[in-house]
């Protein structure tokens, strides 16, 4: 059974960057889509973007264009999401999630990575 | 972007009673060539990531109790919990995956009355 294991919690200063990882264990990686979804405290789910490692082409929600970079390392089965120019509003739980294609539901989710932006 | 709007924002239902959540998309998520609706429902309990309950608008995921059902087509969809159990207390989200960005509804909180 495939699991997505994310990196640990981060505390960052405003204006800095954070890079969160998501490692797939127990199954195939490259042919699936890995997406990133964030959830601010007490709020709903917000799609940030995704990538299919085999094609290595990412798509981004327009709101995050220019600030987010989504990549994948097929050799290690790991996806990454880097968010720059952090501000307090970026404080949230960040999830990676797997889809069987670019336009499919997310059947497996990582456990989440809490990113806190505070001076 | 396709905007997903859920109603109500919250509801309280007695144990064993029916809970109904609605989801409306700003444009159709029905792919006419295969007649599939690109619509999913998720359940999120406190402190946990979301869990996929239903995709293609009405297909239950493996292991999901049959008291959960999805219906609808085009722009209007419904998630029904036929007999609410204590473990169903959660926030439920609909999501369209017809077009990127893959947008979610704002969520519906289900509680016990």
Image (tube, coloured by chain):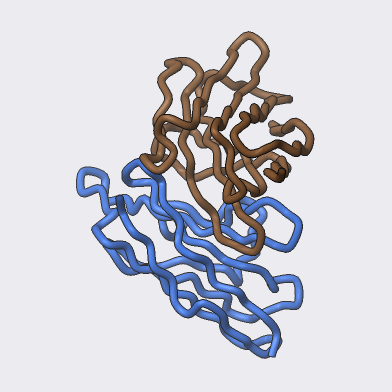
Chain colours: A brown, B blue
Decide: is A94 above or below B52: above
Above or below — where is A118 with respect to B41?
A: above
Q: Position of residue A73 (x, y in %)?
A: 59, 14
The N terminus of chain A: image quadrant: top right
Q: Residue furthest left?
A: B32
Which residue is situated farthest in the right direction here? Answer: A8
Where does the C terminus of chain A fall, quadrant-wise?
top right
Q: Is residue B76 above or below residue B41?
A: below
Q: Residue at x 54, y 54 (%)?
A: A45
Can you tell which quarter of the image residue B22 is in?
Answer: bottom left
| Count of numbered labels shown in the rendering | 0
Q: Determine the residue positioned at 57% across, 50% down.
A: A89
Rendered location of residue B31, percent (x, y):
25, 48
Residue A116 quadrant: top right
Residue at the extreme front of the image, as rendered: A119
- Residue A112 visible in the picture: no
State left or right for residue A115 relative to residue B77. right
| Above-or-below relation of B62 to B58 | above
Which residue is drawn at the image coordinates 63% and 42% (left, top)? Answer: A95
- Residue sitting at 51 percent across and 74 percent down? B80
Question: In this orientation, which residue lies closer to the viewer: A80 or B90?
Answer: A80
Q: Position of residue B93 (x, y in %)?
A: 52, 62
Q: Would you say residue B66 is visible in this rendering?
A: yes
Does B82 sit left or right of A60 as displayed?
right
């Amino acid at each position: 059974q495939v699991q997505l294991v994310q990196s640990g919690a981060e505390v960052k200063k405003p204006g800095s960057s954070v890079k969160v990882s998501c490692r797939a264990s127990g199954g195939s990686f490259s042919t699936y889509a890995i997406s990133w979804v964030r959830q601010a405290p007490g709020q709903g789910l917000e799609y940030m973007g995704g990538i299919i490692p085999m094609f290595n082409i990412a798509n981004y929600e327009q709101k995050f264009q220019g600030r987010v970079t989504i990549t994948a390392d097929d050799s290690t089965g790991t996806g990454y999401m880097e968010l720059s120019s952090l501000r307090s509003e970026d404080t949230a739980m960040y999830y990676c999630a797997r889809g069987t294609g670019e336009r499919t539901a997310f059947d497996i989710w990582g456990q989440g990575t809490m990113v806190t932006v505070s001076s | 972007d396709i905007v997903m709007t859920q109603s109500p924002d919250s509801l309280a239902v007695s144990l064993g009673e029916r809970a109904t959540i609605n989801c409306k998309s700003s444009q159709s998520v029905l792919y006419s060539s295969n007649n599939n609706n690109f619509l999913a429902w998720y359940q999120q309990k406190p402190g946990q990531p979301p869990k996929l309950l239903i995709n293609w608008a009405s297909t239950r995921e493996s292991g999901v109790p049959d008291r959960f059902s999805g219906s609808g087509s085009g722009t209007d969809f419904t998630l029904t919990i036929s007999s609410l159990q204590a473990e169903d207390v959660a926030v439920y989200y609909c999501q369209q995956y017809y077009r990127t960005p893959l947008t979610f509804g704002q969520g519906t909180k289900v509680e016990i009355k």
